[in-house]
């Protein structure tokens, strides 16, 4: 019985040690994604469209032009404050796209940021911000998108 237990324990250790960890903390992709996330957040803080948009796909740039960026930047600063720091919360790979989610601390509240990347993390295909203050402000002012 003792031998069976030891064999099972050895198998468990081997399987655990050999299992591929898809968490981005253990890959070079995390560094790439992290840099692109910082560009987005730093661009918002400094209200610098060039920094914000440097990694965006052409489709995202079309919908987030400089005018839309100015509105977004003001909206985020008014409701969440300035970006302070971020921590990776989750990652998901699906259909040749990679989604990274961050818990961000802004000066007024916590903000959940989700960024979708293309297959090699070179281009940002989507950016999504969520927070209590932003949702409340949007509920009160449905004209923001105009």
Image: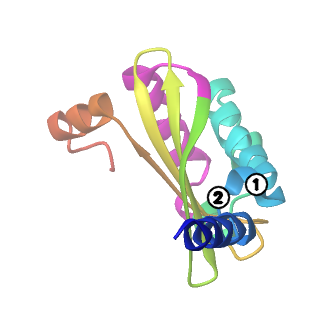
Q: Nearer the viewer, residue 55 or 5?
A: 5
Secondary element under disc 1, as helix, strand or loop, is: helix
Residue 68: within the magenta?
A: yes
List x then y, in percent, for residue 68: 51, 47
- Report the residue that reaches farthest toward the left: 140
Q: Which residue position holds label 1?
A: 26
Vertical comparison of 110 with 5: above or below: above
In the image as oriented, which residue stretches furthest toward the front? 1
Specify the label residue 95 is tagged with.
Answer: none
Verify CB contact (< 8 Å) between mark 1 and mark 2.
yes
Give the residue displayed 61% in from the left and 75% down from the top. 97
The residue closer to the viewer here, 131 or 45, is 131
- In screen coordinates, is 137 left or right of 15? left
Mark 2 residue element: loop
Q: Position of residue 106 (x, y in %)?
A: 50, 22
Residue at 42% from the left image edge and 27% from the top image edge: 110
The residue depicted at 67 percent of the width and 63 percent of the height is 13
Reply yes or no: does residue 93 show up in magenta.
no
Q: Is residue 85 above or below residue 123?
A: above
- The scheme the figure's colours follow is rainbow
Residue range corresponding to the magenta coloring: 62-85
* Snapshot quadrant of residue 136: top left
Q: In which quarter of the image is residue 60?
A: bottom right
- Where residue 101 sits: x, y (%)? 52, 50
Q: Is the magenta stretch mostly helix, strand or loop?
A: helix
Camera-nearest residue between 102 and 116: 102
Q: Where is residue 17 in the image (x, y as percent from the top left)?
A: 73, 64
In the image, farthest residue toward the top? 107
Residue 23 is tagged as 2
Q: Taking 123 as reference, is 2 left or right?
A: left
């Amino acid at each position: 019985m003792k031998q069976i237990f030891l064999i099972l324990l050895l198998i468990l250790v081997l399987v655990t040690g050999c299992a591929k960890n898809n968490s981005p903390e253990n890959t070079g992709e995390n560094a790439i994604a992290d840099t692109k996330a910082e560009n987005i957040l730093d661009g918002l803080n400094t209200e610098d469209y060039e920094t914000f948009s440097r990694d965006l796909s052409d489709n995202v740039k079309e919908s987030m032009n400089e005018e839309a960026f100015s509105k977004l930047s003001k909206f985020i600063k008014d409701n969440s404050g300035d970006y302070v720091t971020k921590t990776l919360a989750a990652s998901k790979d699906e259909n040749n796209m990679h989604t990274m989610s961050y818990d961000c601390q802004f000066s007024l509240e916590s903000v959940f940021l989700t960024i979708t990347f293309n297959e090699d993390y070179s281009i940002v295909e989507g950016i999504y911000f969520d927070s209590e203050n932003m949702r409340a402000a949007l509920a009160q002012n449905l004209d923001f998108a105009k």
